[in-house]
Structure formats: structure tokens, C-alpha cells
Amino acid sequence: MTPDSTYRPASRAPRGPARFIAALALVAVTAACGSGHDDVTPIRSTPAPASAMTASPDVTEVSPGPTAIQSESIATQAGGIGGPYTLQIPRIGVDAPVVPIKSNEERILEPPQDPKVVGWWGDGAVPGEPQGSAVLVGHTVRNKGGGVFDDIGDLTRGDAIKVEGSDSTLTYRVQSIDVLSKEEVARNAEEIFAQTGAGRLVVITCDDWDGTSWQSNVVTIAAPD
């Protein structure tokens, strides 16, 4: 896929309570995945309750391509490591660039257009930050393969997930891997995208292709080593 020339770096959200509200607004979030054809189809979950919808921050749809990665610089925040980032999952052979993304007007967090590139939710925690979920989303591509998270289901508890930054590398260990329906993702969004509690990594992709759309998300949670 060709890079998106309209790429704009994602801005950082305010810290503290404002960022927690942003997490609540992501009740409708899900990862988009490849359908097995040449295109990449965004999939949405159950709409958010009105109370969460009204708390939504300003959002901008960003679909960065791989050429934006080298020029993007992400400042270290509150103990997190600086970017640009590379995600490495040795057990399943992932070694992929990471770019910042934001949810769109419909509160859907779409991965980058390139299925081999990982998207980091720029309104959440920075990788390595001591508090909050650093959320990464990426594609699963049906049949043809080539999605960065095609084999995420092969991970087991204790497997390493590494985030390489501009000056250091963090190692996380898988704590849980759950396949959740779209409805379950919506119901548990406050917990999945939480910006309170100990810092962690949350990796999301799609699962359960029914011939028309993806019915579930694979949610992998990893804690700092």
C-alpha cells in the first residue's frame, strides 16, 4: 500500500483527568483488520452509551503510512521512553514500526493503512509510562496473511513484547490474551483503555471472520518486565 501523504503527527492529550475522560470516550473503539482482499476494511463495535459519547475529546482521523516513521519524534513524557518506536515480538516474528494514531469522528481507532505497521493511540499512555495503558493496534489479514498481528493468538503468558524507542528498549511480558466480542469490548472499554493504574501495554487486533466482517477482538495485555 502506498503511504498517505496527508499524514499529520498525532498530538499529545492532556495528562491526568482529561486523559482518563478520553479513555472513556473510546467505548466504541476497535481495531480494523484486513478482509483477505487487497483493501483494508475498518470494523466498528457497538456504539458507546450517551454518557461516554458526550465526554469525547476532539479527534482527528489519521492514517499514517510507513514513510512518516523516520521523521516522527515523540517526546518522553512522565517516565515513558521517546519515539519513534519499533515493536518486537520474538515468538511470532514481529519487528514492526509504530506510528501515532488518533480515533476518528466515529470513535473508531483505526490502525495505519499499511498492514505491517502498528498504530499507537497517541491520547493514551506513552510506552514505559508508570501509569496507564499504552494501546497498540494493528491488522490481521485473512487468508493472504501479511498483517502484523496475524499470529498474535500464538502468544502465551510470559512471552516477551519489546518496544524499542529512540534511546532505550522496554520489555513487557504477556499477562493475558482474551478474545472478546465487539459487545464485550464496548462493555469493558473503561478497563481495557484505562489511564489509571500501573503502566502496561495493551495490544489489539481482530478475530473471528464470519465471511463478511470480524466479530471479535484479540486483546493482549502485557506488564513491564
Image: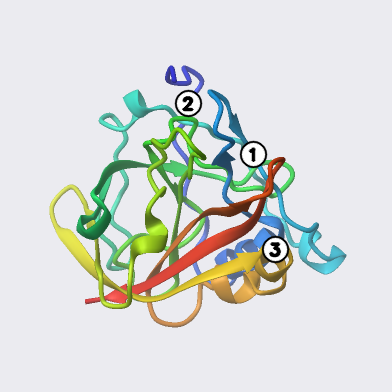
Q: Residue 131 sits in which quadrant? A: bottom left
**Can you give x and y, in whole percent of width and height, for residue 81 in the image?**
24, 58
| Residue at which label 2 appears | 7
The answer to which of marks 3 and 2 sits earlier in the sequence is 2
Classify the position of the C terminus by image quarter.
bottom left
Earlier along the polypeptide chain: callout 2 or callout 1?
2
**Alpha carbon separation for disc pair 3 and 2:** 25 Å
For residue 27, the mark is: 3
Q: What residue is shown at x 35% (from left), y 72% (from top)?
A: 222
> In this view, which residue lies farthest toward the right?
50
Q: Which residue is mark 1?
A: 42
Of 193 and 153, the residue lying toward us: 153
Q: Position of residue 54 (x, y in %)?
A: 81, 60
Q: In this rendering, which labeled residue sits more in front, label 3 or label 2?
A: 3
Q: Amino acid at mark 2?
A: Tyr
- Identify the amino acid type marked 1: Pro
Quarter that holds the N terminus: top left
Identified at 37% across, 36% down, the residue is: 116
Q: Is residue 208 above or below residue 176?
A: above
